[in-house]
């Protein structure tokens, strides 16, 4: 399952710890490595990141790169559980100021330190990867949102902290956007996932629409009933997109267009799916480059008219992420805050 920031490319080996994270030339080279991963990886994430101010783009690239190499390590085809253990150890080292002598680990260390990102957030991301390794399935939409919180809302929270905003209401809306993007990805990748023995659509929905999930997974095919499931998932994503975009106006003006662009581009994937009769078994929806350019322009021109903040409570599954930020801020030293 592709996450909003993921790509099939692999990552390289890693070496012992580095004594200093403050050398400017090394920091530049680390950022260039992260930037290359960003450009080769998620085209949608990369397109939206183009609209970030240069000073924020470096840390955004570092966040993306760490998520990417972690996902690649788990999906590499080797011992996934051993890879997860190694990732947890790397994360511990990063937060203990003993990052591996690796450009991505160093860049991510700088980002989480500078932006005050608590360890619980990337740790939750790794928990989501563990659920993938377990081939966990989800009975209800709420359970599926719990997965989306871990593999996508975590990135939304990190990006919001990167932008200097720590208000719980804004973090809740960032979680909405992250989960919406993940639901869109799940809808897009139904056929690809099924051919790998993975099933993310809520199992209860299969039964409600007269489908046996195990039998369907053995012979995945598109029909009117499956189209209804995909349409239902996209409707849930659209509701979260609408809720989530109300938080964009609370971000710094210089960064709103980038986040709004991400919202528009990912929602457009859902519209491409709808235009193909919600068939994501025999085809994969792609937003054409020309259409992405239009959406980026719309994001630049349209964000001043964003709706006011929706103060509805966060998704229940996302509450622990917001609590982790609040706990961090209660005990953090002044230098750890933006």
Image (spheres, rainbow, N blue to C red):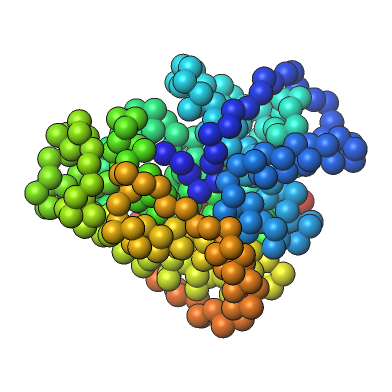
Q: Locate the N terminus and report the quarter of the image it occupies.
A: top left
Q: Locate the C terminus and report the quarter of the image it occupies.
A: bottom right
Horizontally, residue 18 falls left or right of residue 108, namely: right
Query: Quick check: can you spot residue 238?
Result: yes
Residue 110, image quadrant? top right
Question: What residue do we see at 30% from left, 36% from top?
Answer: 194
Q: Nearer the viewer, residue 226 or 154?
A: 226
Position of 207 relative to 305 (above/below): above
Furthest residue in direction left, as rendered? 210
Q: Residue 14, how many percent across, how many down?
A: 69, 21
Q: Residue 202, how many percent across, how many down?
A: 24, 47
Q: Residue 268, how many percent across, how many down?
A: 46, 63
Q: Residue 217, how many percent across, how many down?
A: 22, 35
Residue 271, image quadrant? bottom left
Horizontally, residue 61 falls left or right of residue 289, namely: right
Question: What residue do we see at 79% from left, 56% from top?
Answer: 55
Query: Quick check: can you spot residue 259?
Result: no
Question: What residue do we see at 59% from left, 74% from top?
Answer: 298
Horizontally, residue 255 falls left or right of residue 25, namely: left
Furthest residue in direction bottom, as rendered? 305
Q: Nearer the viewer, residue 263 or 323?
A: 263
Question: What residue do we see at 33% from left, 58% from top?
Answer: 276
């Amino acid at each position: 399952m592709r996450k909003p920031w993921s790509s099939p490319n692999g990552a390289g080996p890693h070496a012992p710890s580095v004594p200093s994270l403050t050398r400017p030339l090394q920091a530049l080279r680390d950022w260039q490595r992260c930037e290359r991963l960003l450009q080769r990886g998620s085209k949608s994430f990369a397109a939206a990141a183009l609209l970030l101010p240069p000073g924020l783009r470096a840390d955004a690239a570092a966040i993306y790169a760490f998520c990417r190499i972690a996902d690649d390590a788990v999906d590499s085809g080797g011992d996934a559980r051993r890879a997860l253990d190694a990732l947890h150890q790397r994360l511990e080292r990063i937060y203990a100021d003993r990052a591996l002598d690796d450009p991505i680990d160093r860049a991510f260390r700088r980002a989480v330190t500078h932006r005050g990102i608590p360890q619980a957030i990337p740790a939750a991301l790794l928990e989501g990867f563990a659920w993938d390794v377990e081939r966990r399935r989800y009975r209800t939409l709420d359970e599926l949102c719990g997965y989306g919180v871990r593999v996508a809302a975590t990135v939304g929270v990190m990006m919001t902290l990167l932008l200097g905003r720590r208000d719980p209401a804004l973090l809740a809306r960032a979680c909405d956007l992250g989960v919406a993007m993940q639901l869109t990805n799940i809808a897009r990748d139904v056929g690809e996932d099924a051919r790998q023995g993975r099933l993310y659509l809520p199992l209860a929905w299969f039964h409600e629409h007269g489908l046996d999930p195990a039998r369907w997974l053995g012979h995945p095919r598109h029909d009117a009933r499956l189209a209804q499931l995909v349409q239902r998932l996209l409707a849930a994503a659209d509701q979260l997109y609408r809720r989530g975009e109300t938080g964009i106006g609370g971000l710094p003006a210089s960064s709103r267009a980038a986040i709004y662009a991400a919202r528009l581009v990912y929602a457009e994937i859902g519209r491409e799916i709808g235009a193909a009769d919600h068939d994501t078994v025999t085809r994969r929806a792609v937003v054409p480059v020309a259409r992405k350019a239009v959406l980026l322009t719309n994001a630049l021109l349209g964000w001043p008219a964003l709706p006011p903040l929706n103060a509805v409570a966060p998704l229940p599954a996302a509450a622990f992420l917001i609590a982790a930020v609040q706990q961090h801020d209660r005990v953090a030293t002044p230098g750890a805050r933006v």
